[in-house]
Image (cartoon, helix red, strand yellow):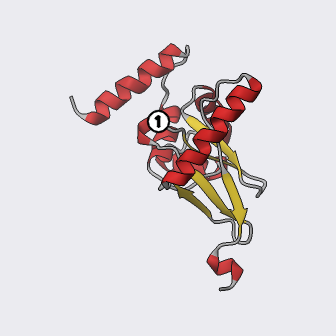
C-alpha cells in the first residue's frame, strides 16, 4: 500500500475517532498546510484550496481550521499583525517542535528548531519549576520572539 493511501486511511480514522467524516475540503486544507513552510492565514489557505476545488468557500475553510485545531492537527498563532496564522501541529504529518522569530518591521516569521543544549536545558528547567509551583502538568509550550530582522534593522 503506498504512503498516500495509508495516510488517507489514517486521516479517515482520526476523523472518525472525533465523530467526523473526512471531506474533500478537509483533506485539501490539510494538503495545503502540509505543502508549505509558511504561516498562512485562512484567506491564504482559501485561495490555495479554492484553486484545487472552486466549490470550497472561505466559511468552509474557517470551519475546517477550527475543527482541525480542536482535533490537535493544526495550531493557530497570533503574530500581532491582526491576522490569525495556521500551521500543522507538532507531531502531525511530521511537523516538529519549533519556536518563532517575528520581525515587527516587515512581518517575516522565522521558524527555528535547531536548539542548542543551553536552550533545551533552560526550557526543561522552566517547565519543571512551573509544574512544581502550580501543580500543573505541562504538555507543550509556545515561544515567540519579537524584534527586527537584519533588513529592517538596517545593518
Q: Which residue is at a point 65% across and 43% down the rendered structure image?
A: 142
Residue 18: horizontal and vertical position, in percent? 55, 16
Q: Nearer the viewer, residue 4 or 89?
A: 89
Residue 85: horizontal and vertical position, in percent? 66, 49
Quadrant for the C terminus in the image: bottom right
Quadrant for the N terminus in the image: top left
Q: Nearer the viewer, residue 110 or 116?
A: 116
Q: Nearer the viewer, residue 139 or 117?
A: 117
Residue 119: horizontal and vertical position, in percent? 56, 52
On the picture, is 49 further left or further right than 152?
A: left
Determine crowd level at label 1: few under 14, some 14-19, many 20+ residues with C-alpha closer than 10 A: few
Report which residue position mark 1 lands on.
Answer: 91
Residue at the bottom extreme of this rendering: 155
Element type where label 1 sits in the image:
loop
Rendering quarter of residue 103: bottom right
Figure check: 117 above or below 74: below
Q: Which residue is at a point 57% across and 37% down the rendered structure image?
A: 74
Residue 4 visible in image: yes
On the picture, is 104 further left or further right than 28?
A: right
Figure check: 44 above or below 73: below
Q: Which residue is at a point 64% across and 33% down the rendered structure image?
A: 128
Residue 57 visible in image: no
Residue at the left extreme of this rendering: 1
Residue 44: horizontal and vertical position, in percent? 61, 53
Q: Nearer the viewer, residue 149 or 123?
A: 123
On the picture, is 148 further left or further right than 53?
A: right
Figure check: 112 above or below 149: above
Amino acid at each position: 500500500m503506498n504512503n498516500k493511501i495509508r495516510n488517507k486511511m489514517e486521516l479517515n480514522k482520526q476523523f472518525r475517532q472525533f465523530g467526523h467524516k473526512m471531506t474533500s475540503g478537509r483533506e485539501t486544507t490539510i494538503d495545503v498546510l502540509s505543502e508549505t513552510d509558511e504561516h498562512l492565514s485562512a484567506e491564504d489557505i482559501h485561495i490555495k484550496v479554492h484553486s484545487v476545488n472552486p466549490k470550497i468557500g472561505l466559511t468552509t475553510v474557517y470551519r475546517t481550521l477550527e475543527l482541525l485545531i480542536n482535533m490537535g492537527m493544526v495550531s493557530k498563532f497570533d503574530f500581532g499583525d491582526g491576522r490569525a496564522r495556521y500551521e500543522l501541529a507538532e507531531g502531525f504529518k511530521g511537523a516538529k517542535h519549533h519556536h518563532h522569530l517575528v520581525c515587527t518591521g516587515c512581518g517575516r516569521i522565522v521558524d527555528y528548531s535547531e536548539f542548542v543544549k543551553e536552550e533545551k536545558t533552560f526550557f526543561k528547567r522552566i517547565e519543571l519549576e512551573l509544574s512544581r509551583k502550580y501543580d500543573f502538568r505541562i504538555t507543550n509550550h509556545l515561544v515567540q520572539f519579537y524584534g527586527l530582522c537584519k533588513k529592517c534593522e538596517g545593518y
